[in-house]
Amino acid sequence: MYEIEFVKGVLEDMDSLEKETRERVFAVLERIRIDPFRHAKKLSGSDAFRIRVGDFRIVFTIELKKIIIYAVEHRKKVYKF
């Protein structure tokens, strides 16, 4: 199982999400801890991956047994970080 680590500011950004969306994001994070490659898609030109949660995207990288979350944003804004 992978460990999940958040970049500074991501958890604070998630506090602004609606409760239902935040719960869905955490459910997906628990699922990707087991197998992050199953549902994730590789971002072109980067080592990062993304996974879709409705209109939101989770952008992360994988290092050894650690998943580092860089962004949880609406799909219109997420790729501008």
Image (cartoon, rainbow, N blue to C red):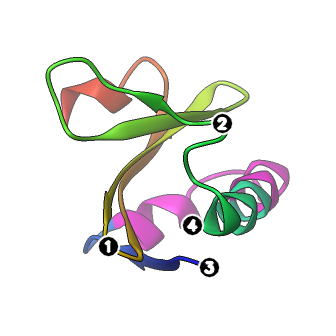
Q: Which residue is mark 3?
A: 1
Marks 4 and 1 sit apart, C-alpha to C-alpha, by: 28 Å
Task: Compute the Cα span from label 4 to label 2.
Answer: 24 Å
- Dot 3 and dot 4 residues touching (CB under 8 Å): no
- Which comes before the other along the chain, label 1 or label 3? 3
Neighbor class of circle 2 (other Cα within 10 Å; few <14, some 14-19, many 20+) is few
What is the magenta range?
10-25
Residue at image mark 4: 15
* Amino acid under disc 2: His
Across and down, in percent, residue 41 comes to: 49, 28
Q: CA distance from mark 1 to mark 3?
A: 11 Å
Q: Between marks 3 and 2, how big is the CA–CA gap?
A: 15 Å
Helix, strand or loop at mark 4: helix
Amino acid of disc 1: Leu
Q: Quadrant of the N terminus?
A: bottom right
20 part of magenta stretch: yes
